[in-house]
């Protein structure tokens, strides 16, 4: 079922590109800064967190602003994708009622649009790393695996939230709180070593079940330190991300048949 659905979605790739392009053009059409605006929020967060944790609390993390940016750009991709996917079924009700196409295309097109933004942000991150003389080139061979893991996680979560929110409108309000909790329980503004020193080992095992942890650490290792990702943590994230993808896919399939009746 999963493989056949993936093949069907691939056959509709032109529609995915069209929807993603439509969303990107609509988002930046009236903005003179264009794609530059996608960098504003992570940069502002980086400045705020650098001041709070770097200046006030004196967190001792090497290249802390770059450390923050590498995590914030990755988080922004995940957050923006889930935020857009949340109402992707509801916002395209007219399209769903008029024609048949794999409904999974709707959240996927949202992810694709945000992936374009994210790839631009990685170019900025790459430039900062070069400026700070981070030895990138050996570590960069691992970047596709880190990105792929995040795409798998994001797609699975997008399937899950888009289908659930189409059926249960309370989901969008629950997600606001969950996203906030997820952000602060991920090693974005603090390091994993700080977590290890703060919580017992048995709780640490639960902490590492957070699939974005290995992904963010992968970006940080590559762009901040020029190191390969911790493969154990990255493979753990990949495994959990695959579970999230399967769960999201079958949840979407379960509710897909009633979309037309409830939106």
Image (cartoon, rainbow, N blue to C red):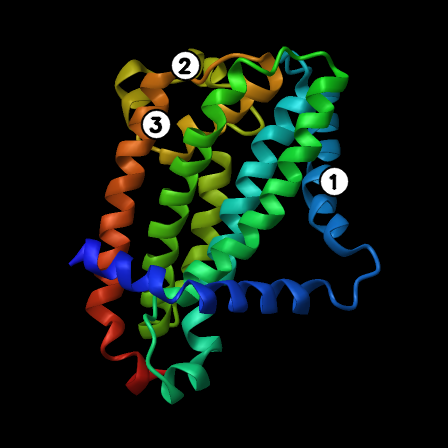
Residue shown at 75%/51% (left/top)?
A: 37
Quadrant showing the C terminus: bottom left
Q: Earlier in the sequence, mark 3 or mark 1?
A: 1
Q: Nearer the viewer, mark 2 or mark 1?
A: 1
- Residue at the spot of label 3: 207
Query: In the rendered view, does 8 fall on the left or right side of 195?
Result: left
Give the quadrant of residue 129: top right
Residue at the extreme left: 1
Residue at the extreme right: 32
Residue shown at 46%/35% (left/top)?
A: 147
- Residue at the spot of label 1: 44
In front of the other: 60 or 30 = 30
Q: Is residue 22 visible?
A: yes
Q: Is residue 172 visible?
A: no
Instruction: Say whether marks 2 and 1 touch (CB < 8 Å).
Output: no
In front of the other: 41 or 49 = 41
Give the structural element (helix, strand or loop) at label 3.
helix
Residue 149: give x, y in percent of width and height.
38, 36
Query: In the rendered view, does 156 fall on the left or right side of 82?
Result: left
- Residue at the spot of label 2: 196
Give the structural element (helix, strand or loop) at label 2.
helix
Q: Earlier in the sequence, mark 2 or mark 3?
A: 2
Residue 214: give x, y in percent of width and height.
40, 26
Query: In the rendered view, does 49 fall on the left or right side of 175?
Result: right
In front of the other: 50 or 15 = 15
Query: In the rendered view, does 104 fall on the left or right side of 66?
Result: left
Q: Nearer the viewer, mark 3 or mark 1?
A: 1
In front of the other: 30 or 3 = 3
Q: Residues within 10 Å of mark 3 (few under 14, many from 20)?
A: some
Q: Residues within 10 Å of mark 2 (few under 14, many from 20)?
A: few
């Amino acid at each position: 079922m999963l493989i056949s659905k993936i093949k069907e979605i691939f056959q509709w790739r032109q529609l995915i590109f069209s929807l993603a392009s439509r969303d990107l053009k609509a988002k930046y059409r009236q903005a003179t800064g264009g794609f530059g605006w996608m960098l504003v929020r992570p940069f502002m967060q980086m400045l705020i967190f650098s001041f709070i944790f770097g200046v006030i609390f004196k967190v001792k993390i090497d290249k802390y602003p770059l450390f923050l940016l590498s995590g914030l750009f990755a988080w922004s991709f995940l957050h923006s994708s889930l935020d857009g996917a949340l109402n992707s079924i509801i916002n395209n009700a007219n399209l769903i009622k008029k024609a048949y196409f794999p409904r999974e295309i709707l959240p996927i097109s949202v992810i694709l649009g945000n992936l374009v933004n994210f790839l631009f942000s990685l170019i900025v991150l790459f430039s900062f790393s070069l400026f700070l003389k981070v030895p990138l080139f050996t570590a960069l061979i691992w970047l596709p695996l880190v990105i792929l893991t995040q795409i798998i996680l994001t797609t699975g979560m997008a399937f899950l939230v888009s289908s659930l929110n189409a059926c249960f409108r309370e989901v969008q309000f629950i997600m606001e709180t969950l996203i906030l909790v997820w952000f602060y329980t991920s090693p974005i503004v603090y390091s994993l070593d700080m977590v290890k020193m703060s919580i017992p080992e048995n709780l640490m095992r639960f902490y590492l079940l957070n699939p974005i942890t290995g992904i963010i650490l992968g970006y940080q290792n590559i762009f901040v330190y020029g190191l390969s990702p911790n493969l154990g943590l990255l493979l753990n994230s990949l495994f959990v991300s695959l579970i999230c993808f399967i769960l999201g896919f079958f949840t979407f399939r379960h509710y897909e048949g009633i979309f037309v009746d409830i939106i």
